[in-house]
Image (cartoon, helix red, strand yellow):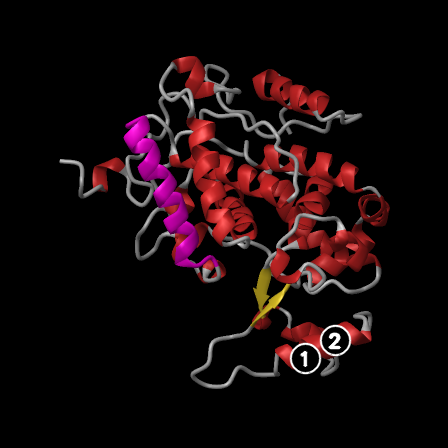
Amino acid sequence: MERGGALLFSLLALAMSLHIGYLRAAVTLPPEDRPLTRHFYKKLNTCANVEAFVKHQVTLFWNQDKSITAKLFKLLYADCMVNGCDGSILLDGRYAEKNAPQNSGLGERIFEIIDKIKTVLEIRCPGAVSCADILNLAARDAAHLAGAPSYPVFLGRRDGLESNAAWVDYPSPSSSWDTAVTYANSKGLDEQDLVTLLGAHTMGRTHCQFIRDRLYNFKNTGKPDPRMKKSLLKDLRQQCPPNTPKGKEDPLVYLNPENGPGYKFTNSYYKRVESYQAVLGVDQQVLWGNHSLVDAYAKYFEQFRREFALSISRMGGLRVLTGKKGEIRRNCRFTNGNNPSIK
């Protein structure tokens, strides 16, 4: 992976500000002529108070619905891990990324929240702030409200011009650990990033369809996953019958029943992994993939918080568009060339 340059310097500054004792390899770098920077819009005098505007809107929504933190994490992951952090997940279209089967759980509400923030910024700073930057800032602010650190977000992303459902290639929630690591590496992240970012599953929900194999037919044995704690298996089977009744929606279960509807950012995810109480198959495999890091995060919440800030910043820098690439959308759902409100 490419090292050095302005983003490496920025990540070093982040590590120092969070008192992190070491620095891992830098993510794929944006063009050297226009790297992501702190206070990008303030320096250009295009929207000096962008972070305050975004934070205010996110706080209003979070006070009404604590689940937006998990949803914004998922939305940011869906954007950055497919075609880079270019806001392409936000584009409408029959064959757009948001309509891929893998993204069916995102829900329209989270897109409406991004729309609202964009509307406010277009009033305050018309044509200045990219949707990709808004998404990164909103995820950071919601995370902080839930208990994560308020880490610096480097800005200057521009929005992509394309979105294609065929690009969506997330690994299955039941993937092997090797498959999950290979996928992360292919996108520009390392194993520690993967272990750390999966900690976002300390909040949020998943559909029963993604865990039925563990509950009823683990590895085509016709039996449940033998390593799942019996009490968890019993609870999940009560919520997830073998088949969804015709005409009914597939039920949702909490990824971390301990946090449940509180949606707090904690390290209890790792404690549950160690006690064989992970809900998703890939989450349980973290224990065998990197037991030492799971143990460290389970014991030391502050270490997890600091490392999460670094890893999500690395993810937010994947394959960004800067300089003259892409555009600043006036509406996050449409490229400017297809925006019906722009004549």
Q: Is residue 117 magenta?
A: yes
Q: On the image, numbered disc 1 is attached to which residue?
A: 237
Residue 79 pos. (x, y %): 48, 44
- Please give left or right for residue 93 compared with residue 239 in the image: left
Q: Quadrant of the N terminus?
A: top right
Q: Badge 1: how crowded within 10 Å, few (<14), some, or many (20+)? A: some
Q: Is residue 225 visible?
A: no
Task: In the rendered structure, find residue 233 and report the number of the disc placed on it.
Answer: 2
The residue shown at (75%, 40%) is 304
Residue 314 pos. (x, y %): 61, 33
Residue 299 pos. (x, y %): 85, 46
Q: CA distance from mark 2 to mark 1?
A: 6 Å
Q: Nearer the viewer, residue 55 or 3?
A: 55
The residue shown at (76%, 24%) is 19
In the rendered image, the vertical position of residue 13 relative to residue 27, given as above or below: above
Q: Is residue 331 visible?
A: yes
What secondary structure is the magenta-colored segment mainly? helix
Instruction: Count how many numbered circles sit on residues in the image.
Output: 2
Residue 290 pos. (x, y %): 81, 48
Under circle 1, the secondary element is helix
Q: Quadrant of the C terminus?
A: top left
The residue shown at (46%, 81%) is 248
The residue shown at (47%, 28%) is 51
What's the magenta region?
106-127
Q: Picture quarter containing residue 11? A: top right
Q: Are marks 2 and 1 in contact (CB under 8 Å)?
A: yes
Q: Badge 2: how crowded within 10 Å, few (<14), some, or many (20+)? A: some
- Please give left or right for residue 116 compared with residue 229 in the image: left
Residue type at mark 2 is Leu
Task: In the rendered structure, find residue 318 and report the number of the disc placed on it.
Answer: none
